[in-house]
Image (spheres, grey):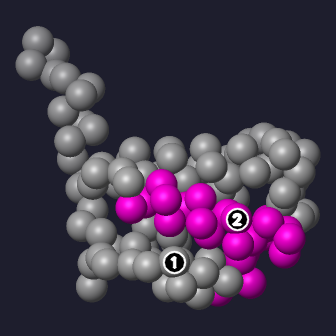
Amino acid sequence: MGSYSYSKEFNQNNVTLGEFDLEKIRKSFTRIFDSYNPKIKAEVFDSFCEDFYELASGMPVSNERIWRMIITDMLFNYDERGYLESASPDNGIKRKQFAIIANVIIGKMRKK
């Protein structure tokens, strides 16, 4: 156990992000939220996409775990403000739903 380092685990599972713009993000999130629950309310959808675009374009992180945490946290913040439709009252269920959505988002962001 002397050579184990948790920080080394964070350096694994890197993801190479593809090029994206705000319109591509809107299209991706439209498809994602059409398929998964919970959904972002229509009146804040554009704001959500713009927030994500600013976050993604300003974040030099390539680690997949960190991206999942960031996306999940973003979804929790929108949920706390009441901007999600059909969100479960159970945080355990929400965490699983948000993790699935985060994995799908990362899959869409990957460089092809």
* Residue 65 visible in the displayed image: yes
Res 99 visible: no
Residue at (51% x, 77% y) in the render? 22
| Residue receiving disc 1 | 22
Q: Amino acid at mark 2?
A: Ser
Q: CA distance from mark 2 to mark 1?
A: 11 Å
Percent position (x, y) of residue 77? 72, 44
What amino acid is at disc 1?
Answer: Leu
In the shown orientation, is residue 32 left or right of residue 2?
right
Magenta span: helix, strand or loop, mainly? Answer: helix
Residue 62 is inside the magenta segment: no
* Badge 2: residue crowd in 10 Å (few <14, some 14–19, many ≥20): few
Q: Is residue 70 left or right of residue 64?
A: right
Query: Where residue 47 is drawn, which disc sits there?
Result: 2
Question: Which residue is pictured at 67% across the width and 63% down the height?
Answer: 48
Describe the element under mark 1 as helix, strand or loop. Answer: helix
How far from the left and from the top, in percent, is residue 66?
A: 40, 45
Q: Nearer the viewer, residue 84 or 52?
A: 52
Extreme-left residue of the structure: 3
What stretch of residues is rendered in magenta?
Answer: 31-57
